Amino acid sequence: MGAAHAGHEKAGIKVGKPLPWEQVKYYADHIRNRGINQFLSIYNKTKDREKDGLLWGDEIEYMVIAYDDANKNAKLSLRTPDILHRLQKEVEETLRKGELVEVSWQPEFAAYMIEGIPGIPYGSTLKSLLRVEQNMKLRRATAFKYLSQNESIITLTNFPRFGCPGQFLEPHHEPFGPKLKSSFVPDEVINPQIRYHSRRGSNVAINIPIFQDTKSQNLFPDCERALPGHIFMDSNAFGAGCCCLQVTIQACNIREARKLYDQLAVLGPIMLALTAASPIWRGYLSDMDCRWFVLEKCGDDRTKEERGLEPLKNDRFIINRSRWDTIAYYISADKTLKSEYNDLNSVYDRNIYKKLIDNGVDELLARHMSYLFIRDPLFAFEDSLHQDDESSSNHFENIHSTNWQSVRFKPPPPNSNIGWRVEFRCMEVQITDFENAAFVIFMILLTRIILSYELNFYIPISKVDENMAIAYKRDALNTEKFWFRKNIFANYDGVEGNNTLFWGFGNEFPGLINIIFQYLESMNIDIETRYHLGKYLEFIGMRASGKIQTTATWIRNFVRSHPNYNRDSIVSQEINYDLIKMVEGIQKGQINSPELLSLAQPNLG
């Protein structure tokens, strides 16, 4: 949501004196206990609040590119801290003048990334949906003012040659730094505002299956941690350095927020497959199309004890899921939620659970929160260890916002007019503002039909996990089937593996897009709004039916049809340069790509 309304949390970004990890670990119980106290304070003050406005917003993460045209090299620019400073100064000046802030900016993990959000949240009217693409275009144009002549700002999920030998950064830095300890990525990719350390005790080992072309070879025959036929990566920067598209929705009350959390969690894997945009890793074509597998591996900060590799001695639990994962528990009090749908039995802190129950929190929400709080805090600041739990939520957010689940249930900030919110975190960012706007609008309309028609998407969470494992496979949208309910209008247990849920199948299921069109017809909207929303939905429908390509398929086809591609899965410096230039041309409207975009796009200025 917009900066003025969202209570935007960025884990690890704070001014103050950070404590070393040993002291963070020492204060972990203190931070957890105070965090739960802060949640209880917020919960007791806001659990009965009603009629909060149906406000919402989106977040887009951008990467800044520096071109070396003479050597045909597109590199990541590490200049975004300076660009961000100037953008935030512009926002401050706009506020000083008493003018409306239309766009706002936040730092991100990497020094080549920047996050843009609307300055104020969008409203509940359908006409407000038409502001999304306009605002996205404004964000891109605003950031462009502060770029150097050889720089560009683009929306790609990941940089294809991140971590490759040679120069992929501007300026160039060597790997093997003391923070990341990576053989491929230097410490300088980390935004200076990020407080970084690893509690895991060892670097992650990420192995992505390579796309086996006719001349592909084994990449790392001498590396013990690398699997044959896989692309090997050794740092969480490969995941944290990805860009995504997120949507945050404020519900009218806590009940609606909990319902949306559950229902959107089921849709997460399907929307991931629909927005698939990352088929290249470390300069190689992979056999995966999405970032989620990499995120799960990069966000896995569990120690050997927590992974069950050593007896518990210094840690509290054996944990069966990464810190970055799908949800562990449904939380809605809706009668359509059956106990058997929560079938994973993930570990949770029973002491915290009891404390929440004793203080009036219901069983489902208590289990959700006590699951999140099995984690340690990742950072702490000397000057903020002792807080007023009635007016601060810093300790709560320290742990809550560093659980990177596919959907996040967000309590209101303390003593604010902000309501209970849900953040949908799965989608991969798209090349153009039109595509990104279409997916944001589609998600908002989905929340409207979920609430208006009391739709029921529940399937066992184990099936959601199965769907997620399917979603990042190559061309999963068109070649795989997903678990989904046949009957979403009633409390019905049948589920069906099928990826045609957007347009329906037979007489059993009408399809999400058709239900949205039915909803729009019932709202008696004006002709112009109906026309433009119809164009966005038409694009979603064409993507879902395979009539136009996912971004991942388009990128893969671009590489394989490049005259310099040698059928060896390698994305060379020149191929990458031409790809990035093509992406820039498409997003600027200078190059037409009918394989990627529907031909009829609304022109909203």
Image (cartoon, rainbow, N blue to C red):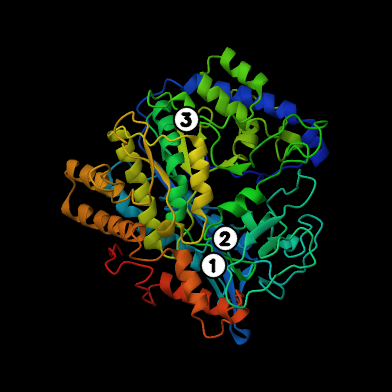
Residue to which mark 2 is pinned: 86
Q: Nearer the viewer, mark 2 or mark 3?
A: 3
Examine the rendering and report whether any part of residue 297 can be seen.
yes
Q: Which of marks 1 and 3 is in front?
A: 3
Examine the rendering and report whether any part of residue 145 can be seen.
no
Residue to which mark 3 is pinned: 341
Quadrant (top left/top right/bottom left/bottom right) for the C terminus? bottom left
Which amino acid does the dot numbered 3 rest on?
Answer: Tyr
Camera-side residue: 411 or 510? 510
Residue 51 % position (x, y): 34, 27
Q: Is residue 328 above or below residue 157?
A: above
Mark linked to residue 547: none
Residue to which mark 1 is pinned: 146
Residue 310 % position (x, y): 81, 37
Q: Distance between the residues labelled 1 and 3?
A: 50 Å
Circles 2 and 1, Cβ within 8 Å, touching? The answer is: yes
Residue 426 % position (x, y): 49, 49
